[in-house]
Image (cartoon, rainbow, N blue to C red):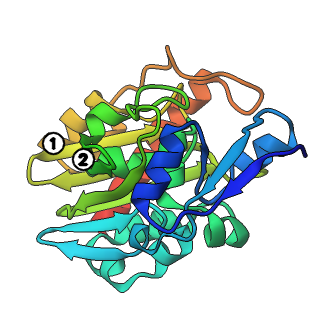
Amino acid sequence: MYAFTFERPASTADAAKLAGAGGKVLAGGQTLLASMKLRLASPEQLVDLGGIAELSGVRKDGNSLVVGAMTRHADVARNADVKATIPALADLAGGIGDRQVRAMGTLGGSVANNDPSACYPTAVLGLGATVHTTQRKIAADEFFQGMFATALKDGELITAISFPAPKRAAYIKFKQPASRFALIGVFVAQTDSGVRVAVTGGGNGVFRHKGLEDALGKSFTPESAAAVKIDASGLSSDLHASAAYRANLISVMAQRAVAKALA
């Protein structure tokens, strides 16, 4: 490694000041530390959020769950309120990476990083969640802006994410066996305002699929999802899967997600 300073603030306000001054924020470290080891990132100052108690935990707020940015994946997966209110979110969190990743990785870190194959962004977008930051509240549809890009400004930190409870929802992913990221992951949610379908692993970042949303809005069944033709143009093609294969996976995962939501 190389020389850098390490700060561990005790409050969100202190963390925001350090981040605003150029410090690199460390949440769970699942991406940042690996990047530093490979010399792909070389921050001069790390700002560890692990000591800020106010950034962790789950609380109910009316018909929504508010999950702190520093809440670990494992804690989301086993939280009683999450299991009771949005079981699809608990299920998603329990399937991220392996036990070590779930023990250290955080909701806020995953969403802020916005890896194009990450699972959490599908829950945020699929449920129409709201991202709370040190400066404002950002709707899910405005937050994700492409590969590793979000609406966050320099020095702006995610403090929590509020997830409205759906009528029913489910997440299914086809894992890349080595990384356990989603080769394709599909989150479907039937909400008061309609059906939302979010896809990860298919391109430059998480996205909603209008064709599936329209079809499932008329009839929320696996058969309706199966009838939607998935356009392969614009989808990723690499050594793991062609664009056509990913298109087929979107259809299959969507059908399975709907069936799971109805079960």
What's the amino acid at mark 1? Answer: Gly
Q: Quadrant of the C terminus?
A: bottom left
* Circle on res. 125: none
Residue that badge 1 annotates? 217
From this view, report whether residue 112 is shown above or below residue 73: above
Q: Earlier in the sequence, mark 1 or mark 2?
A: 2
From this view, report whether residue 6 is shown above or below residue 196: below
Across the whole image, how many numbered discs are drawn on residues? 2
Picture residue at 50% right of the left edge, 19% below the top:
232
Picture residue at 53% right of the left edge, 26% below the top:
203
In the image: residue 72, left or right of residue 124? right
Residue that badge 2 annotates? 128
Numbered disc in front, either 1 or 2: 2
The image shows residue 235 at horizontal and vertical percentages of 53, 22
The image shows residue 184 at horizontal and vertical percentages of 55, 41
In the image: residue 140, left or right of residue 241? left
Crowd rating for badge 2 (residues with CA inside 10 Å; few <14, some 14–19, many 20+): many
Q: Is residue 185 visible?
A: no
Tag 1 and tag 2, C-beta contact below 8 Å: no
The image shows residue 168 at horizontal and vertical percentages of 23, 63
Examine the image and state in which quarter residue 216 appears.
Answer: top left
The image shows residue 65 at horizontal and vertical percentages of 25, 68
Secondary structure of the residue carrying tag 2 is loop
Q: Nearer the viewer, residue 189 or 82?
A: 82
Q: Nearer the viewer, residue 216 or 80?
A: 80
What's the amino acid at mark 2? Answer: Gly
Crowd rating for badge 1 (residues with CA inside 10 Å; few <14, some 14–19, many 20+): some
Examine the image and state in which quarter residue 41 appears.
Answer: top right
